[in-house]
Image: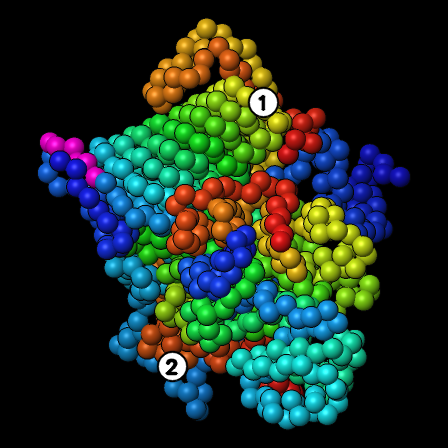
Amino acid sequence: MPTKKNGRADRAELRSRLRPSATFPRDVIAEIQRAADTGIYDIRGFGAKRRVPCFDDLLFLGASMSRYPLEGYREKCGTGVTLGTRYASKPLELKIPVTIAGMSFGALSGPAKEALGRGATLAGTSTTTGDGGMTPEEREHSELLVYQLLPSRYGMNPDDLRRADAIEIVVGQGAKPGGGGMLLGQKISARVAGMRDLPEGIDQRSACRHPDWTGPDDLKIKIQELREITNWEKPVYIKIGAARTFYDTTLAVKAGADVVVLDGMQGGTAATQDVFIEHVGIPTLPALRQAVEALQEMDMHRKVQLVVSGGIRSGADVAKALAMGADAVSIGVAALIALGDNAPAFEDEYNALGSSAGYYDDWHEGRDPVGISTQDDELAARFDPELGGRRLANYLNVLTLETQTLARANGKSHVHNLEPEDLVALTIEAAAMAGVPLAGTGWIPGRGTF
Amino acid sequence: MCGIVGLFAKNPDFEAELGEHFALMLREMTDRGPDSAGFAVYRDAVPFGQIKLTLLAPEGFFWPDFEAALHSAFDGIERFALHGNHAVVVTGVWLADLAEWLRAGFPQLRVLSSGGAIEIYKEKGLPERVIEHFNVAAMSATHALGHTRMATESAVTTEHSHPFSTGEDLCLVHNGSLSNHNRLRRELEKRGVRFATDNDSEVAAGYFTWRLREGDTLEQALARGMHDLDGFYTFAIGTRDGFAVLRDPIACKPAVIAECDDWVAMASEYRAIAMLPGAASAKSWEPEPGRIYSWSH
Amino acid sequence: MTQVFDLAAHSTRELNQTLQRPNGGSTIEQWRVIHPNGAHNLAVGIDAPSRIDIEGHVGYYCAGMNKYAHITVHGNAGPGLAENMMSGLVRVTGSASQYAGATAHGGLLVIEGDASSRCGISMKGIDIVVHGAVGHMSAFMAQRGRLVVCGDAGEALGDSLYEARLYVRGTVAGLGADCVEKSMKDKHKREVEQLLAEAGISDVDGAEFRRFGSARELYNFKVDNAHAY
């Protein structure tokens, strides 16, 4: 028994004898206790926290006797991407193969949305609206803005459709394929309520299916309607959460998409049930392979562009995604972290919220001390959109430089020339999912031989 | 996802031109289903004691050898007609005997339909192509059901196209997507229903065949199906004498029905009905969810 | 002077380009559109107070995202009639398929025949007046605006309703989650009569309607309401 004198040592000795359960580890026990306390499922932001096979399990081969690298600086490595070449008369020209994913005003504060626009514009890329509609700040500060059409249709109107540079029809997102948007009362401020035609302070209930079409046969007609309203100028993207990706990609193409946006299970959200985030959807790695296969089978690879999101963190991820066949990637959580989310400077305030810098995911509560995932005016005022924009631009710059470094090392003068044969896998799962051989062998599980 | 169409002659005088109008209906649904098309046509009813089969062969199949083998194996082959890679066989031979002989000797042939009046044709490619290939516009029939396919979860092959027939003179076309068909398929297989594909619509067809075999009327089978089949659907089912239409209780997949003195028509979109003679003055309505609509001669 | 547009001779693309934002300021354009034959996306995205008569049946999304225009369909309409309308008037003399008036923010939609399922789904400020019946799941998640049904309403009326006001004269097959009947006061009767007058319906009395609205029990999550989700 611990005595007062040797309390600490005795407690340490006690802990060294305790054996945790793999079936009921501490966090699972805590969750069951929380459920019994409250009677409601756990809701949080962020993406899937558990480890799944991902780009970390792939490596580039680099240069060798048979493959020569490019010199940095002098020997160019192009990074430009054009999105929306299939039908639109005004496709989007991006300077870098990284875009900012849809995140709503409502989930994020006004200054945060402004910062995303500023940073993306400095870097020569696009941002995307989210559930709730287009804010003037975002349109003003984003040179290229993609406007989402979601099941809720909050704030949808033809003027914003015509002001947008592209239209993204959201069928699903990686964190919750089959789920609708979620925004709780503490973030339904007067302004958000006004934009969404909801009473202030209530919990927004969400539709998970679109209100006026069901299935790709109907979607085809809906896309034509949007094109008719916008004079066939703007690219139409279809965003899907990774589920039955091969078929979903095929159907998106058949329904008439210019661009397919694929969000893997690691993709973030502002607020969803934890069970949904962790247990529905497949990882970005196999989804990406399936999407590329589907496009190639229809002879549509590079004709319908593919943008991939869900756990993109570094230029290595960008380069690997491009090598597997994506035209571009999209970042959400990473962009927020670049803006300042989970910054160590706010550790004390995170502690006061029951969390810690690097762990904070209660974005649905709207009490973010950094001022990003909140609607509280005081908190939001802490966030400097110009500084945030600069930070995002810095991060996008690093992603691009890293991608170019890896591309040059593999002998490519444009990042789109990266290919699956430049990659190998460290694990059997990743080899099977990505369709690349296990490093040092010729083996792709399911095909080929040792 | 797809387009479905159905046309039923109320007035016998309309039968001669049924194919002509049906062809236009099918083509109008191309946007909803550009991958493949298929149709069931009920015509040239055979005398009592005989049965009509439609067979589908793979590309490059040599029919003359097959025809010779058929004649030498069986007496009583009344008719053998070729339409591209489909053959229509009319015979007095027991269906069970013939089916077993086919399975043993010609496993690459698929029996698309069997019955007294039904013929089923399906082909990959645009509906336009299918219509021309089988000369649908020249057909005279009592009723016909058709389907244009945009493949969802199974492959684009001719076998995967609708209509599916798992019973005599019975066929089904489906717009929508079932969600519990895999488990249901395994259960039906245990009850002796055979499936040729992994297609969800084929499971629905198999389910109705089973129920009818168990003695249900078509209405009873459909009512039970509403309980046992999960997902989104507009079904059009063809029988010897007519057809039935059913939408699931959520009723998100579209359906329009129109009726006048000469005909009854159903389609996924009104524009497939718009060009029928008398469409402008026909009564048109949307079938209610979970309600069985049927017509028969 | 009424102009005529023949869809048998010209495409939907040309129709919409012609109608969307007409040149010239002061006169309100008048159009007759003939031979629609069930085509989709007719008269979508219009942004001018034109008067448009479409003679025949239309397919999906007719008058989608309409602003200011007065559009009449002389026939039946397919799914999504006047979806996301912002303002103006859309009328159909026959029946409308599902999702009529879906997510619309303003204006008036008049359906002289029946509306199918999900009429007024997610409505955000539009007024819808239906002379006939509406199908199941009508006014699903309806946020703002008014729905007046002179005939019957199908199952699950007003499921997950927010602040839209629903008035039904016929029978209601069933109410959706959090939708309850509320009292009809004089001001409600007047509201119905005003909408009926705007819709040009005079064979029906405002006093015969019942009012339905949100019980507001689902506005903030309570564990005891879990079964409603």
Q: Which residues are magenta?
A: C26-31
Q: Position of residue C172 (x, y in %)?
A: 59, 24
Query: Quarter-wise, where is residue A386 in the image?
Result: top left
Q: Is residue B56 above or below residue A450?
A: above
- Within 10 Å of disc 2 (Cα), the crowding (few <14, some 14-19, many 20+) is many
The Cα atoms of the two marked residues, 2 and 1, are separated by 73 Å
Query: Which residue is the site of mark 2?
Result: A411
Most common secondary structure along the magenta stretch: loop
Identify the residue shown where x is 28% and y is 75%: A76
Q: Position of residue A154 (x, y in %)?
A: 42, 36
Identify the residue shown where x is 27% and y is 45%: C34
Q: Position of residue B212 (x, y in %)?
A: 76, 57
**Closer to us: B18 or B290:** B18
Query: Quarter-wise, where is residue B129 in the image?
Result: bottom left
Closer to the eye: label 2 or 1: 1
Q: Secondary structure at mark 1?
A: loop
Res. A369 visible in picture: no
Label placed on residue C171 = 1
- Within 10 Å of disc 1 (Cα), the crowding (few <14, some 14-19, many 20+) is few
Res. B158 visible in picture: yes
